[in-house]
Amino acid sequence: MNFSDLVQARRSVREYDLSQPVTDADLKAIFDDVILSPSAFNLQQWAFVVVREAEQKKRLRAAAMDQAQVENCGAAIVVCAKLDAHNDAPTVFAQAPEPMRGRMIGMTAQMYGGNAQFARDEAIRGASLA
Ligand SMILES: Cc1cc2nc3c(=O)[nH]c(=O)nc-3n(C[C@H](O)[C@H](O)[C@H](O)COP(=O)(O)O)c2cc1C
């Protein structure tokens, strides 16, 4: 399927065939793609929580304005925006040559460390794109 066909065919689906379980292999295939998403400074300001246990999905539904599809699914994925992703910069840029490495660590610390609102906005952008 080419990209245009994919976009044309996409829909928000809210009823699921629970006879088809969401397997660990399915999730791995999904997240192998997801983590290739672009992110500011490659900080990957996201974390994902997969909820498959019935009682936890019920609690999640209550937190999601009682939307039935949050509970009546094989797996609900909570997309989290990582507010302190700039602290990962030394790891993200571990292989980068100097002076690039130091510059990137300094820039991300300055841009996000000193501006919680910007860090939050950027994290929401990155997590949403993913
Ligand atoms: C930021 C955002 C929040 C959304 N929140 C919900 C939601 O809480 N519940 C839901 O069922 N759909 C939600 N949607 C899906 C939209 O309702 C849906 O994309 C829109 O109605 C268009 O339908 P389509 O995706 O089938 O083309 C959300 C979409 C976006 C982009």
Image (cartoon, rainbow, N blue to C red):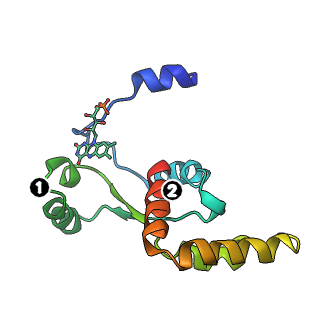
Residue 71: image quadrant is bottom left
Residue 123 percent location from the top left of the image: 48, 63
Residue 19: image quadrant is top left
The secondary structure type at the circle numbered 2 is: helix
Please name the amino acid that badge 1 sits on: Asp
Position of the N terminus, as image quadrant, is: top right
Residue 99 percent location from the top left of the image: 87, 74
User: At x 88% / y 74%, what residue is drawn?
Assistant: 98
**Looking at the image, can residue 91 be seen?**
no
Viewed as shown, does residue 25 lie left or right of 70? Answer: right
User: At x 11% / y 55%, what residue is drawn?
Assistant: 66
Q: State yes or no: Cβ of the residue under disc 1 lies below 8 Å from any atom of ligand 1.
A: no
How many tags in the picture? 2
Earlier sequence position, callout 1 versus callout 2? 1
User: At x 50% / y 19%, what residue is drawn?
Assistant: 5
**Looking at the image, can residue 112 be seen?**
yes
Which label sits on residue 66?
1
Q: Quadrant of ligand 1?
A: top left
Closer to the camera, 94 or 70? 94
Which label sits on residue 22?
none
Viewed as shown, does residue 2 lie left or right of 119? Answer: right
Q: Nearer the viewer, mark 1 or mark 2?
A: 2
User: At x 64% / y 72%, what residue is drawn?
Assistant: 108
Asked if 78 appears above or below 26 in the picture, the reply is: below
Closer to the camera, 104 or 23? 104
Residue 74 percent location from the top left of the image: 29, 51
Residue 29 percent location from the top left of the image: 54, 49
Pointer 2: what residue? 126
Please name the amino acid that badge 2 sits on: Gly
The secondary structure type at the circle numbered 1 is: loop
